[in-house]
Image (cartoon, rainbow, N blue to C red):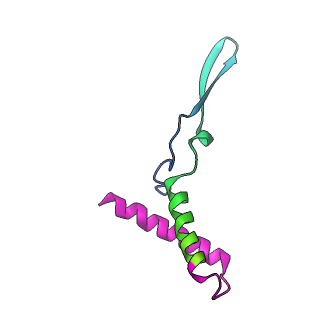
Amino acid sequence: MNKDDGGSAFPNAPLYSLQEEDGIYELLVDEQSLGMTLRDYFAAKAMGGVIAATEALIKIDEPHLAMWSYKMADAMLKARES
């Protein structure tokens, strides 16, 4: 199952290149040039808020924080649909 990643958070023009083999040209698109996804951006924002609010108070369990951040990002993406 592919999760909805919301597309590119900061869209920019994709990088294109031509590949030639035996006189046949193929246009290639570098998907990595599209930047981070909106899901990644939302997760980073959620994580930053939790860390800022709790850093001095408790030891943060990083794997659980990361999972929670992506759950929050998924909830934010779902909220955008309505």
Residue located at (53% from left, 58% from top): 41
Residue 33 higher or lower than 71, as above or below = above
Q: Position of residue 2 (x, y in %)?
A: 50, 55
Toward the top, the furthest residue is 23
Q: Position of residue 4 (x, y in %)?
A: 46, 55
Residue 2 higher or lower than 21, as above or below = below
For residue 65, which quarter of the picture?
bottom right
Residue 12 higher or lower than 81, as above or below = above
Depth order, front residue of 81/50? 50
Q: Position of residue 75 (x, y in %)?
A: 42, 68
Residue located at (64% from left, 81% from top): 55
- Image: magenta residue range: 53-82
Q: Position of residue 15 (x, y in %)?
A: 60, 32
Residue located at (61% from left, 39% from top): 33
Report the quarter where the C terminus lies: bottom left
Residue located at (65% from left, 85% from top): 56
Toward the right, the furthest residue is 22
For residue 76, which quarter of the picture?
bottom left
Toward the bottom, the furthest residue is 57
- Predominant secondary structure, magenta span: helix
Instruction: Please give the count of numbered marks on the rendered protein.
Output: 0
